[in-house]
Amino acid sequence: MATESAEAEVAGDSAVELPALPEGSVAAFDILKATLGDCVLGSHIKPTGDLWVRVAAEAWRQAGEVARDELGCVWFDFLSVIDWLPSPFGRDMDAEQDRIVYGAPARELEAMEHGYAGGESRLQVFARVAALPSGSNAGVAPAVILKADLPDENPAVESWISVYAGADWHEREAWEMFGVIFVGHPDLRHIYLPSEFEGNPMRKDFPLLARRVKPWPGIVDVELMPGEAETADGDGAADAVGGAE
Amino acid sequence: MNTTTREQMAYIAGQAADARLNVELETEGMTLNIGPQHPATHGTLRIVARLDGEQVIEAEPIMGYMHRGYEKLTEVRTYPQVTTLINRIDWLGSFANEVPFILAAEQLMEIEAPPRAQWIRTILFELSRIANISLFLGDMGVQLGALTPVFYAFRDREFVLNQIEAVTGGRFHPNFDRIGGLKDDLPAGWIEETREVLGKMRTFCDELEDLLMGNEIFEVRTRGIGIIPADVGLSYGLSGANIRASGVDWDIRRDNPCGLVYDELDWQVWTHPDGDSFARYWVRLQEVREATKMIEQLFDGLPSGPIMAKVPRIIKVPAGEAYVETENPLGAMGYYIVSQGELVPFRVKIRSASFNNLSIAPWLLKGVYVPDIITILASLYFILGDIDR
């Protein structure tokens, strides 16, 4: 959703009057665009200066190298994955219990909605690297958040270990939690969970069992604020959740 | 000390190990298990060290004993409920955990806390820093066989925790920060009491400087031990005092204070060029001192006014993504929130300082001697809740 508008903002084509974008972030985007060419698929810049750039999965490692060498983002912040699949178990305060006990209607599976810089696939790897603020080696932009779409059936992407040594544990965590394979990582092993654990817990279709069988924590003691009018039939869970505006 | 010397040292150690392996009476490698329960770790961490004689060939931290799956749990909690969970990440400086999350949510909602709330947030943030780091300052002594400092630390940290408790009601888990402001104002007379406590903490720093830093054994065990060159530290994502002790002049409080009022204060970022265990201790000691000064300035300039902005009763965060990072006691901590306009976050990535800070350990422990494993790990100062999340 953000892709087109953000591109327009960067290129300055937008007809709408927008607040001036931070120069550093625009310059950083230009460098990435110039080096990676068609591999830059989308971008987004916030007025606060945060820069998102989505690159093709095959350019993932190269994007990291450009960020480190050309943008001066020498500090590795984090690397992780987002699973954009809408939870098949419903959102908000849905639980099996709510459905059975309170009779809330079952929700239909919603369409996938991607965040800043757009996206096409379910799993997206993302990482943030930052530059030092001052001194001779100050970076072009304060930081850049890179994203890359991963194929659905065999989510794999090149490892960043050769670019940022700190990516090692982050990639192990992402592999364990999302099942993303980092090609070239020497040691993809479980980091938190026991080595015989099966499944990828952070994927949206991995059920959080405790949530499936218990009502929403705190749902029973939603109190009205002083002076707030009580609704006509206001004691059910559904009212407490959605009723107050 | 730069990379080259470090590499040379590693090379020499490797050569020596090879030479030992080539003689007929070869030594047998040994695997040493440290932990999971060990006083050098705040929490449960196991370290498997493969030794050749007294030298470490390879050391591998094994964590996960405290994994609680907070990132998954946040997906089924409303935004106000999340602060209860994230309090427990770095339990020694809990209030500081709440701040970046609240700031990120406020950024998405385009709400700004009133000035008084921002100032009180900064006060409590720095108090958590003092409470957190003062324990480290004493604990480091224990790892070297000096038992006295840790008793001093526990004694004096309690004064700070009492002050935090007086405001928030919780010693360890305040759960005090709210989207749009704070739960409550400061109690009457609290500022005067806290000023006294700050004086005590400065005395505590002086005492430790006398007791530990001037101590010959302490210097021998920490100077030149566990050297982290700046470039290596940066590529591992080290932050906070760990990277400042390697001579990197970088502090998020000064360079991107977003939402906290460090701009209004007169203070200094402390760095140390050496990058060894001693430097990390020294930088943290200075930071506690600096924090006491900052809080006094915050008291002097504390504005009056409301402590809560106008926020809707049911908090729905508009769709978008935000990442806010603050300089927590342990280093840079940030929350990456993906919202899809619902009551609950769609995804929260918790970037905790200790995870990155410890990830350098396999690199750093290569070639060191067994007793140094403990001092190096202690000087990196991590909290397992902050690693396992």
Image (tube, grey):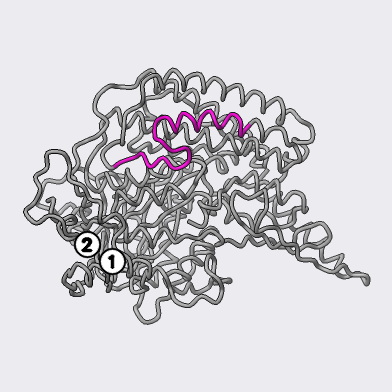
Q: Residue furthest left?
A: A232
In-image side of A213 versus A80 (left or right): left
* Residue holding disc 2: A3
Q: Chain of mark 2?
A: A
Looking at the rendered structure, the secondary structure element under dot 1 is: strand
Mark 2 and 1 residues: CB-CB less than 8 Å, in contact?
yes
Q: Is residue B112 above or below residue B188?
A: below
Instruction: Give the magenta part as a residue range.
Output: B153-178
Quadrant position of residue A79: bottom left
Give the position of the N terminus of chain B as an image quadrant. top right
Q: Nearer the viewer, residue B217 or B153?
A: B153
Element at badge 2? helix
Instruction: Look at mark 1 in the image and give the residue it sits on.
Output: A41
Q: Are marks 2 and 1 on the same chain?
A: yes
Chain ID of residue with mark 1: A
Picture coordinates of residue A202 (x, y %)? Answer: 40, 68
